[in-house]
Amino acid sequence: MPPPNENETYAGRTFKDSNKIYRLPGDQAELERLSLQHQLLRGILGALYPCDASEINDVLQVPSPPDGRRPQVLDVGSGSGLWAMQMAMEFPHANIVGVDINESRPAHIPQNCTFETGDITRGLSRYYNSFDLVHCRCMTGAVREYPVLVRELWKCLRPGGMVVTGEGDLQVYNEQKVLAEFRKDNDDDPTHSWLARLLHEVLSLNKRRSATSIGWQLKEILQDDGGFEDVNYKRRYAPIGWAGDGSIEQGEHVGRMMRKNCYDFVRAWRPLLLMNGFPAEQVDMWIHNIDVELHNPTVLRQYNVWHYAWAYKRDDAMRQ
Ligand SMILES: C[S@@+](CC[C@H](N)C(=O)[O-])C[C@H]1O[C@@H](n2cnc3c(N)ncnc32)[C@H](O)[C@@H]1O
């Protein structure tokens, strides 16, 4: 069955990407999931960004640039819009622009924040050489070649500007932070994961068109680009439905949000699985088993891994 067209509803969910690269829905339920995911990522980092606040303050010239220019921030694939709006509130002297293929807009947008509709696979030329900070989170599923996207992000930056990339794994890890084994249909080992199973099937489908679990390579991709300096990397393990090993503040709260995110995330992948020939009964059985597995994680405690890499555009980088 071909993927649905833009704004087409399939298996009860509505899709937005006319290129058919991005396979998650773009409907209200998904925007709400993205809002929740944003809040939990903010909880994991304790901030809107993975680096020290002093680095962001430098790049955005807090409290204000000496030449009176308003610092410019671009959020590529702005999703629910929460990151852009919260940045606008934290940095009222800056302008924040969010761009997304989905034309939906959040309510109550701060004055220094704007949202534009655009398809990043067609290039970002209208933003070239304009931004002090470019943020790009969870966008690997929207493009065929992540390094090509990174080159576009680089072009959007002013010299010395900062790029921040972040991606979550489409795999889960056990309490020992080792990749969880996925559960097969007749497998009764409770230490094997149904969540890992569904994500394994999704990853296998997505691998046919692009690498979807790219977080582990983020740092290398920024380094290999050649246009960045001072490349940094940070990884965080988000507990799903439990409090984690104590390394995350408010672990229990983050764990609860992460569990709800997973409930909604696996449902968001359901249309893709049905479209690719998996019977609804089988997918719904996986989803039911995931709900049970995450509801009371005693035998199997799982983590989802989030990767962040950030770097600065080299002053001498002239390559286009
Ligand atoms: C997984 S969400 C991440 C949203 C946001 N960056 C975040 O971290 O909350 C991916 C976003 O990319 C958008 N998207 C997908 N394909 C796109 C494209 N070709 N151009 C622009 N945005 C796209 C989707 O509409 C969705 O909002």
Image (cartoon, rainbow, N blue to C red):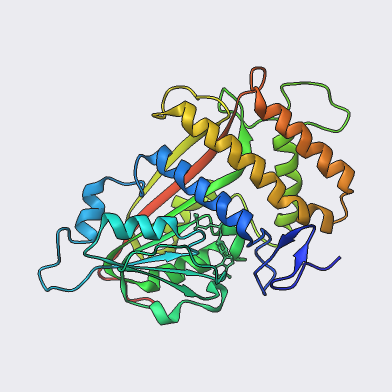
- Asked which quadrant contains residue 227, the reply is bottom left
Residue 10 makes an appearance in the image? yes
Give how far across and how far down residue 5 sits, in percent. Answer: 74, 73
Q: Quadrant of the N terminus?
A: bottom right
Give how far across and how far down residue 135 sits, in percent. Answer: 40, 60
The residue closer to the viewer here, 247 or 320, is: 247
Examine the rendered structure and indicate whether residue 37 appears above or below residue 10: above
Give how far across and how far down residue 66 sits, in percent. Answer: 10, 69
Q: Is residue 127 left or right of residue 105?
A: left
Q: Is residue 11 left or right of residue 253?
A: right
Residue 182 makes an appearance in the image? no
The residue closer to the viewer here, 87 or 165, is: 87
Q: Total of numbered circles in the picture?
A: 0
Q: What residue is shown at x 53% (from left), y 72% (from top)?
A: 120
Examine the rendered structure and indicate whether residue 66 appears above or below residue 169: below
Examine the rendered structure and indicate whether residue 229 appears above or below residue 298: below
Q: Is residue 173 left or right of residue 288?
A: left
Q: Residue furthest left?
A: 66
- Asked which quadrant contains residue 103, the reply is bottom right
Q: What residue is shown at x 39% (from left), y 60% (from top)?
A: 84
Q: What residue is shown at x 79% (from left), y 37% (from top)?
A: 286
Q: Residue furthest top?
A: 298
Q: Residue furthest bottom?
A: 126
The quadrant of the picture showing ligand 1 is bottom right
Examine the rendered structure and indicate whether residue 80 appears above or below residue 292: below
The residue closer to the viewer here, 211 or 199, is: 199
Q: Quadrant of the C terminus?
A: bottom left
Give how far across and how far down residue 167 sits, in percent. Answer: 51, 50
Q: What residue is shown at x 45% (from left), y 71% (from top)?
A: 152
